Amino acid sequence: MRIEYTGTSELSGSLMVIDGVLGVGYDELAEITLRGGGRRQGRVIAVDGSRAVIQVFEGTRGISLENSRTHFTGAPLKLALSTEILGRVFDGVGRPADGLGEIFPKERRDINGSVINPVSRKYPRECIYTGISAIDATATLIRGQKLPVFSGAGMKHNELAAQMVRQAKIGDGSNFAIVFAAMGVKNDVADFFRKSFEDAGAIGRVVMFLNLASDPIIERIITPRCALTAAEYLAFTHGYHVLVIMTDMSSYCEALREFSSSKGEIPSRKGFPSYMYSDLASIYERAGQIHGKKGSVTQVPILTMPNDDISHPIPDLTGYITEGQIVLSREMELAGIYPPISILSSLSRLMKDGIGEGFTREDHAELSNQLFASYSKVQDARSLASVIGEDELSPTDKKYIEFGRRLENAYIRQDINENRTITQTLDMAWDILSLLPREELDRVGERLLDKYYRT
Amino acid sequence: MKNKDTAYYIHGVNGPVIDVRGGTGLSMLDMVRVGELRLPGEVVSVSKSGATVQVYEDTSGLCHGQPVYPALAPLSIDLGPGLLGNIFDGIARPLKKIEESSGVFITRGIDIPTLDPGKLWDVTVNIKEGDFVGEGTVFAECEETQAVRHRALVPPGVSGVALSVKPSGKYATSDVIATLRLKNGSEHQLTLSHKWPIRVPRPVNERLPISRPMITGQRVIDTLFPVGRGGCAAIPGPFGAGKTMVQHQLAKWADADIIVYLGCGERGNEMTQVLEEFSELTDPKTGRPLMERTILIANTSNMPVAAREASIYTGVTIAEYYRDMGYHVALMADSTSRWAEALREISGRLEEMPAEEAFPAYLPSRLAEFYERAGLMKTLSGSEGSITIIGAVSPQGGDFSEPVTQNTKRFARCFWALDRSLAYARHFPAINWNGSYSEYFIDLAPWYDAELGSDFTAKRQRIINILHEESALQEIVKLIGSDILPDDQKLTIETARLIKTGFLQQNAFHKTDTYMPLPVQYDMMELILRLFDGAKTLTEKKIPLSLLRDTGVFAELMKMKFDLGEGAGKDRKYFEELIDSAVAKVLTENE
C-alpha cells in the first residue's frame, strides 16, 4: 500500500518537517509531489518520535504547508547502475541529464557505499605516468590513490587535470573509465572538461555527474557520492581502472556548511560543521584497490583554497585524509609557468612503494629526495639575495640560484600538450642537478652519483 | 510495533545518536543493541523520560518504534589468547573474520566474538588443587605466537582456593580450566579469557618510577628527546610532516615486547600497509615476523565515529592486559586528534555546551584519563610491566595552539614537534630540535651515563647547545649571508649542518640507517664533537676553516651514518684517525 502524507507542519530553508509519520527510517528517500505537478526528492535527516525532518534536494521554494504530498520509499537514495552509464551525463543526484532517457539498471546501489575492510584492501603500488615532470618525479600518482590538487581561484587546475586525463595511462588498453563530478562549477568549466574528454577520444568512457553553480546546493552533497558509487561499480564489479575527477571540493564543503547551519548545528572552525572530517573521509576513502578484484578507483579531487590559504579547514582536513597533495603556487602562476606546481609542498604518500628499481628506475627515490633538499636551499639563497643582492652571494649560493631558475623554467615548465616519459623526466632532473657541485648532493649514494652525475 | 522481548524502543534518530524510550532501567555506559539489525551502542545519558545512546555503526534505516535490547553490562571486550597478530575494529571485532563473513565491504550488525571460540590452545596449567590463587596470578600459559607466550591471568577482583583443576592440554578460550572457591563462598570458573570493561583501568599493585628509556633506534629520539619506558610522548604535526612514518618506525623498532597499533580515524591504506609490512619484516630479537608481537586496531576515517571514540579505550585495555602479564607494551595512537574530534561530534549531537573550538569542556579530563593509563607498574602478581603511549596529534592548520595539542602537552612529558619546513626539505624524521623536549631525560640521565659512558649527558648537552647557537646565528645569516661571519661562528654553523644532516636525519628506507643501536649513536656524537674540537684549535690559531673543509672531512662525516654499525665497513677508529690526520695536516701546513 502506498502511503502518502498530505501537507507539512513546518518549512525552514531546505528542510521540511512532517508530523504523525510512522515507521520512517533515518536516511530514507522521500518523494514529494506538489499540487501543481512538480516532483521533488528529499532525504530524512532526523527522526524524533513521529516527526520526520526531510532535507529537500531541489529546495523548498513554492512548497506551502498544504500543497504537497510526501511518500517515503523505505530505502536510502539508490543509484541505478549498468555499464550503459559510460558516455552518459547525469545531474547532481544521478538522474539522466542528456535527454537520452533512463538507463536500464542491472542493479541499484545505496549511494553512501560501504566501508572497505582494511584487511581486504590491496596496498597500491603501480604508478600512473601522467607525462608531467613535476608530478611523475616528485609526487608520483599511484593507481588507487587519492591525490587532490590544491589550487586557488583563477589558477590553471582545470587545464592540469585535463592534461592528466589526456596523458595518463590509467589502464592497460581498453579497461579504463573516467568519472567526472562537478560540484558548483560554472557551466563553461563543465564544457571545458567535456571538450577535453572529446579531444582525448575518451568521451565514450566518461560518466559525468553535473551539479552546476546554479543547481540546488543540497544536491551538491549527493553528487560526489553518486559519482563514487558509479566508480566503485565500474571498478569492482566490471574490472575497470577508474579515474575520478571531482571539482570543486570547496563548493561541496560550503554546501555542507550552509546545510549544517540551516539545521542549527553547533559550528566548529570557520563555521564548518564539526563532522566535516568524517564527512570528507566518507568520500575520499572510497578509493583504492581490493584483493581479488581487477579494477581500481583513483581519485583526483580539485579544491580551490580560499585566499590561497593552505591552513584553511577545507585543504587542511583534506590533506589529513588524502594520500598527499599537488599544490599549485600563485607565484609560479604569475611568473607564467605552466603547470604552476609547487614541488616542495606537493607530496605523494604512496610513491615510496611504487618507484625505484623494478617500478620506475633505480635512482628515482634518491633523486627526488635530492631535488626536494636542493630546491629548498634555493629558497634560502633567494631570500638572502633579496637582502644583499645576487652579486654578493657566495659562489655556491649563486649556483643554487641558477639551479632554481633552470628547474622552474625547463623542468617544471612544460607545454600543455607535452608528454614526457619517465626516463626523459629523470634525465632532465639529473642535467639540472649537475649544475650543483657534486658534494652538495648529500641525498644520493656514491654509486648512483658515479652513474648519473654529469661532469 | 512494540516488541515483547524488550520494553525499550527508538524514539528519535540524529546521526549516530539515538533517543531511547520505554523505561528507566538503563545505566550509564551500558551496552545496548539497537533496532532489528541489533547494532551495538552505548548509553551516554539517562533521564526520567528515557536515555540517549551512541551507536557504533551507521544508523541509516533506523525507525521510530524499533526495539532496543539492553545488555545490562558496560561495553566490555574479551581478553585472551588470539589477540596478537590480528586486526580489530574500534570495538574489538576481528576484521579478518568479518571479511570471511561479509566480503570486502563491511556490512552492519555483524556480531563476531573477538577471540576465535573454536581454536584450541596448547595450555600448560601452573596451579594445582588446593592452591590459593590471588588476583592477577598466572594460572596457565600457552604459546600465543612463536614470539610471545600468553600468560592467562586470574581476573582482577577474584581470588580463592582452587577446588578443581584440569590437567595441561588443549583448551579453547572459553573452556573451564579451574574452579575457585571465593571468600564469600561462591564459585568462580577460570577460563583462558575474561571480559573487561574498556573504560575502567585495570588495577595494579603500584606505580614505579620511570628509570630507563624505550630504545627506538632513532637518533633524534634516543639521544636528544628520549621517552621513558612507561612514559607518554606526543607527536604533533601538520599533514605531510611524517607523523605516521615516525609511528611506523617506532612500531617496528622500539624495544617493547608487544605493540598495540591504533589507527584512529586514519587512512585505510595505512592500516593495510602496516598489516602487509609487519607480516614480512622480522623482529631482530625473536627472528619471527613483527606481526606476531603486534595487535592492530583500525577505525579508519570512514568508519563510524562513535566506534572511534571507543577505539582508544579498546587499545589501551588490550595494552593493560599484556602489561599485567609482565610485558612491556608500546601503544601507538594515530591520531588522538581524530578521537578528540569524535568526542566533539558526539558532544555536538548531544547538544552539550561547547568550550574552546567547539570541543566539549571535558576534553582535558578525558585526555588525562587516557594518558594516565600509561606507566611502569608492579602488577597484581608482583612482576613488572609497562605501557608507553605514543600519541600522534593532528593540529588543525598545523597550529600548535589549538586545544588538543595544548592539552596533550600538559599530560605527555615528551613532545616531538614535527615541522612542515623540515618535511618540505625532506629532512626526516622532521622533528624540530628547537620546539621539542623530553622531561624524562633528567630521570633517565643516570641510566645513560651508566650504560654508555659517564659523559653521555654532557656530550648530548653540547650537541643541543651547538644547535641552539646555530639557530640564533641563522637570524644574522638571513640578513648578511654566512661569508661575513667570523670563523668560530662559521664553525658552529658548519657543525650544526653536520649534526642536522649527518646525525638527526635518518633514512627509514636504508638497510642499516633505519635502526641505529644506541652505542653507535654515542660514537657518532663523539666523532662530531671531536671534529668540532679539532677545528676549534685551528680557528683559535686563526687558520681559516675553509682549509679544513677542503680536506673533505666534513663531507665524509656527513655520510658516516651509512658506514658505521654492524657490517657496514668502517668503524669509529677509522673516523677518529681521519679527523685527527685532517686536523694535523692543516695545522702543520699553516703553522
Image: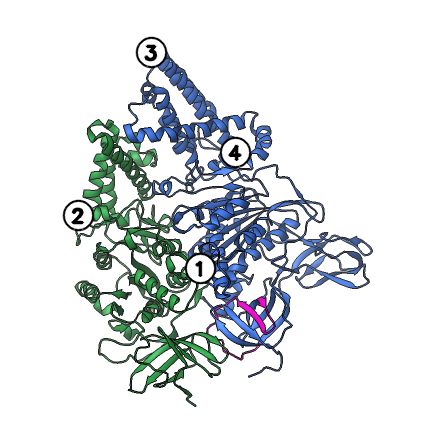
Q: Which amino acid type is shown beneath numbered disc 3?
A: Asn
The earlier-in-sequence mark between 3 and 1 is 1
Q: Chain of mark 4?
A: B
Q: Which residue is mark 4?
A: B518
Give the crowd class for mark 2: few <14, some 14-19, many >=20 residues within 10 Å. few
Residue B268 in the figure: left or right of residue A249: right
Mark on residue B301?
1
Q: Chain of mark 2?
A: A
Q: Give the foreground label among 2 and 4.
A: 2
Mark on residue A276?
none
- Tell me which secondary structure the magenta stretch mostly adopts: loop
Q: Which residue is mark 2?
A: A336
Residue A175 in the figure: left or right of residue B333: left
Q: Which amino acid type is shown beneath numbered disc 4?
A: Leu
Mark 3 → mark 2, Cα distance in angstroms: 52 Å
Which chain did the image draw in green? Answer: A
The residue furthest bottom is A1
Disc 3 is placed on an element classified as: helix
Q: Which residues are magenta?
A: B44-67
Residue A264 picture quarter: bottom left
The earlier-in-sequence mark between 4 and 3 is 4
Mark 1 → mark 4, Cα distance in angstroms: 36 Å
Residue B205 pos. (x, y %): 70, 47
Would residue B60 be counted in the magenta stretch?
A: yes
Circles 4 and 3 in contact, beta carbons < 8 Å: no
Q: Chain of mark 3?
A: B
Disc 4 is placed on an element classified as: helix
Q: Which residue is mark 3?
A: B590
Mark 3 → mark 1, Cα distance in angstroms: 64 Å
Would residue B123 be counted in the magenta stretch?
A: no
